[in-house]
Amino acid sequence: MNLLRKYYLAYGMNTNLSSMYQRCPNAISLGKVTLPDHELQFKQFCDVVPKKGSDVDCVLWSITEQCEKSLDRLEGYPDFYTKKNVQVWHQGKLIWAMIYVMTDYYEQNLPSEYYFFTVLEGYRSHDINENQLHQALNRVDHILTP
């Protein structure tokens, strides 16, 4: 089994420790990092979009190739989510990490209650400020409310 590892950034349901360990038992949480110049959005599920001056707190994971294959299936890669590499600071070093981003087809929409609370639990276990979730909800609510 190939245990080559890479960095992966999670900002949605893969911040949840128990859910992530079920999908990727060899994943290692490296804690909270900040993705600069991006904004969290809900398009029923979480997404990050470029936005100068905004930051998104994420969870940095060390994953194996097998983990990535499992995540690809979960994220509907390449149709629902695609991948890109981004730079973040971790322990004083600038590193490259893979992140999933939604394809352009999806618009902002409210998440299910179950999904929201799964993400919220992940944020709490990694000491990520919950405000970014609530702000993303408020932005969707402003779009959907006439």
Image (tube, rainbow, N blue to C red):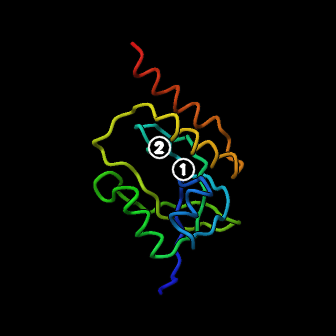
49 or 42, which is in the foreground? 42
Residues under labels 2 and 1: Cα distance? Answer: 7 Å
Along the horizontal axis of the image, is 96 left or right of 90? left
Q: How many marks?
A: 2
Which residue is at a point 48% across and 60% down the rendered structure image?
A: 86
Residue displayed at 64% across by 45% down? 121
Residue 139 on image: x %, y %: 49, 27
Q: Is residue 54 left or right of residue 104?
A: right
Q: Residue furthest top?
A: 146
Q: Is residue 145 above or below residue 2?
A: above
- Where residue 13 sits: x, y (%)? 53, 50
Query: Are the residues at dot 2 and dot 1 in contact (C-beta closer than 8 Å)?
Result: yes
Q: Residue at x 30, y 59 (%)?
A: 78
Say what secondary structure mark 1 lies in.
loop
Q: Is residue 131 above or below residue 77?
A: above
Amino acid of disc 2 = Cys
Q: Give the labeled residue for mark 2.
A: 46
| Residue 47, image quadrant | top left
Say which of 131 and 85 sits in front.
Answer: 131
Tell me which residue sits at (62%, 42%) in the image: 120
* N-terminal label among 2 and 1: 1
Q: Nearer the viewer, residue 110 or 143?
A: 110
State the image coordinates of residue 28 (x, y, percent, origin top left).
62, 69
Residue beneath disc 1: 11
Q: Where, by quadrant of the figure, is residue 90 drawn?
A: bottom right
> For this view, does 13 lie left or right of residue 49?
right
Query: Label 1 is placed on what type of residue?
Result: Tyr
Residue 61, placed above or below residue 80: below
Q: Secondary structure at mark 2?
A: strand
Q: Which mark is residue 68?
A: none
